[in-house]
Amino acid sequence: IGSTTTDIICIHHGEVRTQGVDDFTRLKYHELVYTGLVRTPIAALVGSLPYAGDKIPVVAETFATVADAHRILGNMPAHADLYPTADGEAKSVVASARRLFRMIGRDYEGEIDQARLMAAHVQECQLQSINRVIEERLREMYGNMPDTVVVGMGCGAGLVELLAQRNRLNYRAFDSFIETSEEFAKQSDDSISPSVCGPAIAVAFEYARRLKPEEAGFCVN
């Protein structure tokens, strides 16, 4: 799960089992879900938000993004929060709540508990939208899910772990597959961890695999 999309890649006995090769075909075969940790508009995820016991339809405007919900819930890693907010204002919890309230046509008046409830609803809808596709793909690929290992990467790897727990599946962070030097560990931070940079690491390894032996004398950092 990245800032914008979720990629679902099935691997069976070491073989990648994907059908899509670009955004169009990956969407067609349900291997790409267009929702991520940061940029997804709230209106693309929910039709209504809970407020004071009612369900209030959301306005069809990009007044808030899913990043606002994750900030309110404390699920937004600082290294992933790189994009401008919908209104160009601060990335604080209060500013995020203000944007979220605009989605139901209200001004925020310090109702932080209500803001958390709304944010939790947004996150739940996002997880459900991804989970439906995961269940479908796993049923198609394996018939059932109990022995499946879910490997998470991207800035939204924390959400991948939540999805694995929801389906009672074994979870491993991508970091656990990559050996890094002590020097790298001392100098790096979460923004360049193997899990966050997994897609780039995969491209580097694929490039190295295609090189002739005499050309492959480089280190993947």
Image: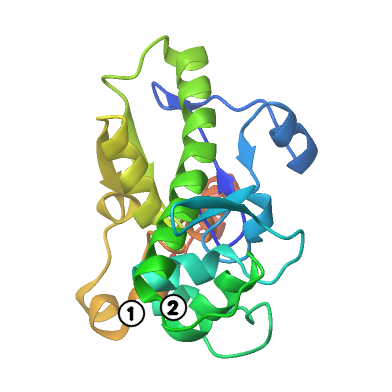
Which amino acid type is marked by label 2? Answer: His
Q: Is residue 197 above or below residue 137?
A: below
The circle drawn on residue 79 is 2
* Numbered label tally: 2
Residue 46 in the image, given as x and y percentages of width and height: 60, 49
Extreme residue toward the top, this view: 143
Residue at x 46%, y 34% (from the top left corner)? 131
Q: SS at mark 1?
A: loop
- The local crowd at label 1, few if under 14, some if 14 to 19, many if 20 or more residues have their Cα within 10 Å, is few
Picture coordinates of residue 119, whole percent (x, y): 45, 62
Evaluate if marks 1 and 2 touch, with contact meaning CB atoms under 8 Å apart: yes
Q: Residue furthest left?
A: 182
Q: Amino acid under label 1?
A: Asp
Which residue is label 1 attached to?
A: 189
Q: Considering the numbered disc 2 on the image, is that residue within a helix, a strand or a loop?
A: helix
Identified at 61% across, 90% down, the residue is: 89
